Image (spheres, rainbow, N blue to C red):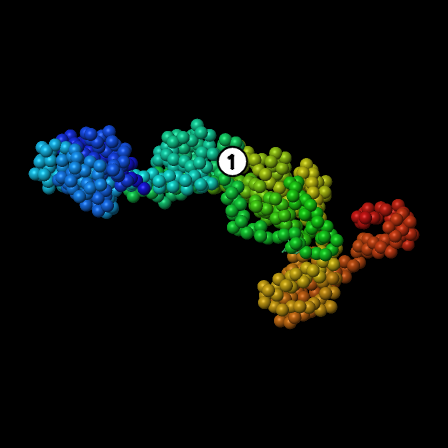
């Protein structure tokens, strides 16, 4: 709150101006009865309290009315005064200084001579009006001061809000001269680059500045660009947004907002809930193989090493990759999946690496960020890596080795911190031999190999998986399936599951959509499963399978020692060397 004391210099100027013109002394007091201005003999008392003499002033302040004291020292108001009966003043006119109907001070004309008293008395009305006007002038100054203080304080308040923002914020005039910036912007750029009066061109490339200035020409224009900024510490990727600052009579300037790219991708991740997906507990299966997979995933999730997940289609490779990501410290970052088979070769490169504006005909304005960059601080899932063309294999290898990515048409590489999880159903070793897969990349991605067995080799998982999918489809399809008939179970057990868990899921969805009962029977099986009977039977004649199964059965009945193996070899009618060769061949431990 502004007080009369805050405008004391102005009050003194007014007092002196009046005294010079009317040749009568002036005294001004504030609401605390402190003399804030005075002329003649009262000048030296400025700043002092008037509480022992200013009884008339006290009354003016209390009532908010003007007073004329024709007989100072004898007037009843002067009763408590020390100078009562002996007052040097001969006539006094005092007016309140009112602000918003409240007396915040008082101004008085003080006559010491008879001549002065006579003059005022004779022109009392004019002097009263004059004094009232002077009081109003001082009150106006006070209001103005209050208004200015309000402006300063709201400006300060707004600046504090702007400084609280994590985003860097700059404002510039329509030619790009910087007018204002917040503390976040200040932290980004070195002090000599960002000063009031410096130009946007000292911060951004010519192309970006041209784009920013465009928003000054059109109130509907908003520019969004991705920029790399050399900060005080390092080079960071940011998203720049420029918007016009609208005034009543047109665009007044341009606001530029800068946000770290990482933050945006984290927000996108959170909002899109893409990672709400799979956790390690979602990977079902009671088989030893699946228990091991879950345990292994927990152990390796914290690291940064590349993981290679192998397994047939539908075994849950992507699910496992997501679960590893969600278990890892990178779970706040993006999980970017790219299927190397699904995207045409020509597009795959730009999807992965992105491109700069003008990199090729048809390249989008402003360029495009690639999935590798998007996965910064997160996980890049390269699905079906076996189908990646050789030239891209070389580029991916460089990313893995140098931890940098260079956009198509770009000149400077950007550092990226991504964990790569690759997956394939293909026999990479065979591809290596044929020169279809790069050996160096193979070793780079195969740091942590994980193999998900096909469902036919872990049929004990069928029960858990069936229970889970039945529960899911009971809800989704509004069914109430509780049981599987023996025949249905048997069919599932006999089937070879070329499409693995995905196929099981489809078969259950099909069966459940056909029934209104609480039990699924063979009748509800899809024709595919029924027709498979034949091929299933033929599968059973595969000699290698039979041999493997026979060896396994035989080993289970003998003890796990050299003697046990000798007995098994004897029972099988083969020599020990042959048995060992077959154990290696069928990968039996
Ligand atoms: N162990 C599991 N527990 C629960 N659901 C599973 C499991 N394995 C796979 N699934 C389900 O099977 C489907 C296929 O999984 P996913 O896409 O991860 O397989 P994939 O091996 O990556 O397949 P592809 O190689 O064809 O891309 C998903 O719907 C997933 O929910």
- Is residue 321 at least partly visible in the picture? no
> Where is mark 1, residue-wise?
236
Image coordinates of residue 320 in percent, x first then y, are: 65, 50
Place of residue 26 in the rendered image (x, y in percent of width and height, measured from the top left): 18, 34
Tell me if residue 419 comes above or below residue 526 in the rendering.
Answer: above
Q: Return the residue nearer the eye: 157 or 60.
A: 60
- 36 or 185: which is nearer to us? 36
Most foreground residue, 583 or 65: 65
- Return the residue found at the far bottom: 517
Left-right relation of 100 to 495 = left
Residue at left offset 75%, top offset 62%: 494
Q: Residue at x 82, y 55 (%)?
A: 549
Ligand 1 found in image quarter: bottom right
Furthest-top residue in this view: 192
Which residue is at the front of the view, 149 or 551? 149
Q: Is residue 76 visible?
A: yes
Q: Is residue 335 above or below residue 524?
A: above
Instruction: State the SS at label 1.
Output: strand
Residue at (50%, 40%) from the top-left corner? Answer: 260
Report crowding for label 1: few under 14, some 14 to 19, many 20 or more residues within 10 A (C-alpha): some
Q: Quadrant of residue 487?
A: bottom right
List x then y, in percent, for residue 555: 86, 53
- Left or right relative to 494: residue 382: left
Q: Residue 362, percent across and down?
A: 48, 41
């Amino acid at each position: 709150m502004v007080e009369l004391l805050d405008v004391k210099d102005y009050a003194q100027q007014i007092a002196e101006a009046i005294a010079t013109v009317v040749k009568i002394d002036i005294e001004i007091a504030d609401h605390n009865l402190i003399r804030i201005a005075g002329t003649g003999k009262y000048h030296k008392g400025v700043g002092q309290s008037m509480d022992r003499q200013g009884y008339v002033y006290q009354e003016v302040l209390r009532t908010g009315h003007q007073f004329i004291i024709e007989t100072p020292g004898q007037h009843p108001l002067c009763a408590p005064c020390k100078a009562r009966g002996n007052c040097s003043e001969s006539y006094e006119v005092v007016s309140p200084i009112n602000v918003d109907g409240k007396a915040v001070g008082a101004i008085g004309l003080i006559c010491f001579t008879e001549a002065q008293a006579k003059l005022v008395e004779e022109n009392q009305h004019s002097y009263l009006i004059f004094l009232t006007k002077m009081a109003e002038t001082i009150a106006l100054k006070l209001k103005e001061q209050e208004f200015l203080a309000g402006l300063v304080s709201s400006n300060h308040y707004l600046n504090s809000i702007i400084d609280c923002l994590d985003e860097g914020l700059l404002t510039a005039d329509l030619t790009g001269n910087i007018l204002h910036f917040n503390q976040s912007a200040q932290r980004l750029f070195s002090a000599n680059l960002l000063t009031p009066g410096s130009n946007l061109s000292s911060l951004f490339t010519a192309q970006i500045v041209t784009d920013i200035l465009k928003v000054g020409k059109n109130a509907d224009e908003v520019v969004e660009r991705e920029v790399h900024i050399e900060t005080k510490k390092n080079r960071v990727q940011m998203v720049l947004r420029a918007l016009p600052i609208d005034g009543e009579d047109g665009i007044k300037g341009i606001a530029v907002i800068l946000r770290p790219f990482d933050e945006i991708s984290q927000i996108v991740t959170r909002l899109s809930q893409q990672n709400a997906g799979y956790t390690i507990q979602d990977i079902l299966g009671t088989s030893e193989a699946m228990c091991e997979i879950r345990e292994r995933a927990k152990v390796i999730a914290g690291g940064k090493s590349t993981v290679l997940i192998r397994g047939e289609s539908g075994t849950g490779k992507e699910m496992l990759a997501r679960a590893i990501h969600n278990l890892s410290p990178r779970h706040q970052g993006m999980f970017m999946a790219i299927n190397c088979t699904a995207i045409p070769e020509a597009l795959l490169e730009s999807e992965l690496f992105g491109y700069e504006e003008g990199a090729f005909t048809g390249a989008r304005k402003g360029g495009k960020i690639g999935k590798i960059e998007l996965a910064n601080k997160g996980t890049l899932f390269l699905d079906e890596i076996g189908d990646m063309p050789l030239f891209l294999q070389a580029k991916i290898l460089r990313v893995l080795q140098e931890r940098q990515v260079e956009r198509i048409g770009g000149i400077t590489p950007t550092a990226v911190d991504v964990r790569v999880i690759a997956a394939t159903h293909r026999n990479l070793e065979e591809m290596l031999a044929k020169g279809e897969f790069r050996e160096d990349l193979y070793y780079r991605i195969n740091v942590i190999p994980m193999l998900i067995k096909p469902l036919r080799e872990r049929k004990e998982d069928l029960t858990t998986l069936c229970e889970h999918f039945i529960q899911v489809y009971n809800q989704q399809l509004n069914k109430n399936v509780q049981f599987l008939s023996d025949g249905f179970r048997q069919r599932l057990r006999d089937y070879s599951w070329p499409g693995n868990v995905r196929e099981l899921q489809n078969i259950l969805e099909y069966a459940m959509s056909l029934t209104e009962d609480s039990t699924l029977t063979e009748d509800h099986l899809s024709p595919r499963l029924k027709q498979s009977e034949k091929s299933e039977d033929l599968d059973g004649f595969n000699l290698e399978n039979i041999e493997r199964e026979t060896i396994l059965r035989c080993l289970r009945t003998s003890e796990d020692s050299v003697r046990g193996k000798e007995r098994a070899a004897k029972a099988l009618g083969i020599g020990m060397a042959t048995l060992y060769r077959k154990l290696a061949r069928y990968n039996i431990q």
